Amino acid sequence: MVFAKAGAIIEKWKGYKKGRLLPYLSNQKMNQWLKVIAVKANINTGRSLTTHAARHTFATTVALSNGASMELVQSMLGHKDIRTTAIYGKIVKKRQMSEMIKLKEAVEPSMEPK
């Protein structure tokens, strides 16, 4: 049943554009819709609401601050080089503190005299 629905959707858009299976919104169009949504939702961040801002927010606020590894974020964002991901990786204070606690717990037992 699920495959039948998927097949019907694919069939509906067959031949839409050469090389594309389904239609999609460009970044420009998506950014226009984000602005409309922000106005309707009465969201005023003082900054432009864009797909780039959404990626950055996801990478830093959602993923990294909740313990996702830099490598996982790299994979989700589709970056080939970890240095590209590091740009998104502003380590938030919460993550820094949890990493330091883990480090302290790992190091303390080895510092006890034998």
Image (tube, helix red, strand yellow):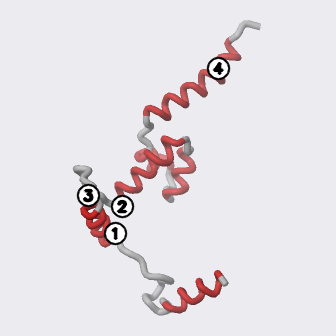
Disc with the residue nearer the chain's start (4 vs 3): 3
**Residue at 57% across / 50% down in the picture?**
72
Three-letter amino acid code at disc 1?
Met
Q: Are marks 1 and 2 in contact (CB under 8 Å)?
A: yes
Decide: is 69 above or below 20: above
The residue at which mark 2 appears reads as 51
The span from disc 2 to disc 3 (Cα, nearest Å) is 18 Å
The residue at which mark 1 appears reads as 30
Q: Where is residue 41 in the image (x, y as percent from the top left)?
A: 29, 60
Q: Quick check: 6 left or right of 52?
A: right
**Residue at 41% across / 56% down in the picture?**
55
- Identify the residue at the far front of this view: 41
Disc with the residue nearer the chain's start (2 vs 3): 3
The residue at which mark 4 appears reads as 107
**Residue at 27% across / 67% down in the picture?**
36
Q: Where is residue 80 in the image (x, y as percent from the top left)?
A: 51, 56
**Residue at 64% across / 81% down in the picture?**
2
The residue at which mark 3 appears reads as 42
Helix, strand or loop at mark 4 = helix
Three-letter amino acid code at disc 3?
Asn
Q: Are marks 2 and 4 in contact (CB under 8 Å)?
A: no
Q: Which mark is residue 60?
A: none
The span from disc 1 to disc 2 (Cα, nearest Å) is 7 Å
The residue carrying pointer 1 sits among few (fewer than 14), some (14 to 19) or many (20 or more) residues within 10 Å by Cα, namely some
